[in-house]
Amino acid sequence: MQPFTYMRPATTAEAVSAFAGAGEGARYIAGGTTLYDLMKLKVERPRHLIDVTAIAGMDAVATEGEVMRFGALAPMSAVAADPVVAAEYPVLSEALLKAASQNLRNMATIGGNLLQRTRCLYFRNPGGATFACNKRQPGSGCSAIGGLDRGQAVLGISEACTAVSPGDWPVALTAMDAVVEILGPGGTRTLPVVELYRLPGATPHLEFTLDTGEIITAIMVPKTPAGTASTYHKIRDRESYAFALASAAVALELEGDRVTRARIALGGVATRPWRAVAAETELAGTRLTPEAALAAGHAAMRDATPGRHNAFKIELGARTVADALLIAAERSRA
Ligand SMILES: Cc1cc2nc3c(=O)[nH]c(=O)nc-3n(C[C@H](O)[C@H](O)[C@H](O)COP(=O)(O)OP(=O)(O)OC[C@H]3O[C@@H](n4cnc5c(N)ncnc54)[C@H](O)[C@@H]3O)c2cc1C
């Protein structure tokens, strides 16, 4: 085990200044459900841990006018169970409830969930085997390409990396045009959730657009007329708990059975939370029949590139989108 220092600041300002003072190898830690894991696997080797869980008020959830504001330290389980979220944003509560297990959701924070790293086996390198991974060790290659790639991405991939973006919650937030609030040495800024994630390109080790020392303080979700006509549909190998093979976050605005606006984002199939713009455009103004829903699903997966063992994700992704659209439409009639 590599030695590390440990600090527990009481405010966000203290956290940012502790990070700056700690120097190289500093990392924030919240619930620790994924960072400790990666430390044990020796994939992450932080020298300084700045535990943010003592920061008062950073777990608050509140409606502020037309926006729902979620403090980044709110536990996943608490946000999922919030009665306003469950009633008015089913896509959000379902994305959380279908992620991990209840005891993990009690520990894990919604801010940490945004920044979890890929579950690609070659990245996690269990047992210290000698797999190449450009994300873990830049320039070393990618054993997943041409290897066992059943779980890998088919959208947003590059010659350097095909690792899937693992989180469910960021996919739902992407569909809902959510924004993150960030505090760093340069002050506060906001950023659309979708812009938090980089495509792998030639530099897959650079995953997020946060600057050094920046902390996510909150997530804001604007209200939408879609209301309850939203869902998070997740297909996985094991229903009790598992990461997505394919998932779709959908919110619909309808006039009768005609779609006036669809929001669609995909998980489990892409290297970052994936907004399905082509599918949204194709659906606008159409009657939402099962055939139209499947056509939109195929539009969402149109740019997919399969590897050796994951071509099934293209049809699975299309059908996941189609099912999600029909579930959301059914809810609008309830
Ligand atoms: C067995 C298992 C199954 C799982 N299944 C799923 C699943 O199906 N779907 C899913 O979405 N997730 C799943 N997860 C992942 C789980 O949801 C994450 O581990 C959890 O959300 C991370 O939150 P945390 O607070 O524990 O983060 P931590 O482990 O504390 O931190 C994660 C990362 O975020 C950074 N960080 C944390 N908070 C902040 C902040 N406020 N500002 C800046 N940086 C920060 C840390 O530096 C670290 O890099 C699973 C995990 C396990 C162990």
Image (cartoon, grey):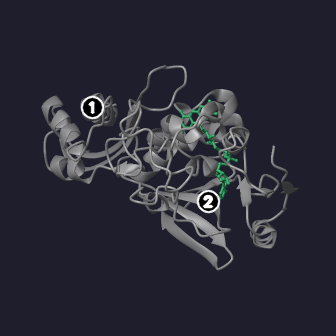
The residue located at (65%, 31%) in the rendering is 127
What numbered label is drawn on residue 218?
A: 2
Looking at the rendered structure, the secondary structure element under dot 2 is strand
What numbered label is drawn on residue 237?
A: none
The residue located at (65%, 67%) in the rendering is 214
Residue 54 in the image, given as x and y percentages of width and height: 82, 54
- 10 Å crowding of disc 2: few (<14), some (14-19), many (20+): many
Task: Give the CA distance from mark 2 to mark 1.
Answer: 37 Å
The residue located at (23%, 50%) in the rendering is 280
Q: Is residue 212 left or right of residue 303?
A: right
Residue 122 in the image, given as x and y percentages of width and height: 52, 38
Q: Is residue 115 left or right of residue 9?
A: left
Q: Quadrant of the C terminus?
A: top left
The disc, 2 or 1, on the residue closer to the chain's N-terminal end is 2
Residue 257 seen in this snapshot: no
Amino acid type assigned to the residue bearing label 2 in the image: Ala
From the image, state whether disc 2 or disc 1 is nearer to you: 1
Q: Is mark 2 within 8 Å of ligand 1?
A: no
Residue where numbered disc 1 is placed: 311
Pointers 2 and 1 in contact (C-beta within 8 Å): no
Q: Is residue 212 left or right of residue 310?
A: right
Residue 9 in the image, given as x and y percentages of width and height: 84, 62
Which quadrant of the frame does ligand 1 lie within? Answer: top right
Front residue of this view, candidates 29 and 176: 29
Front residue of this view, candidates 330 and 40: 40
As drawn, the residue found furthest toward the bottom would be 186
Looking at the rendered structure, the secondary structure element under dot 1 is loop
Q: How many marks?
A: 2
The residue located at (54%, 33%) in the rendering is 99
- Quarter residue 181 falls in: bottom right
Task: Identify whether 313 is placed above or below 223.
Answer: above
Amino acid type assigned to the residue bearing label 1 in the image: Ala
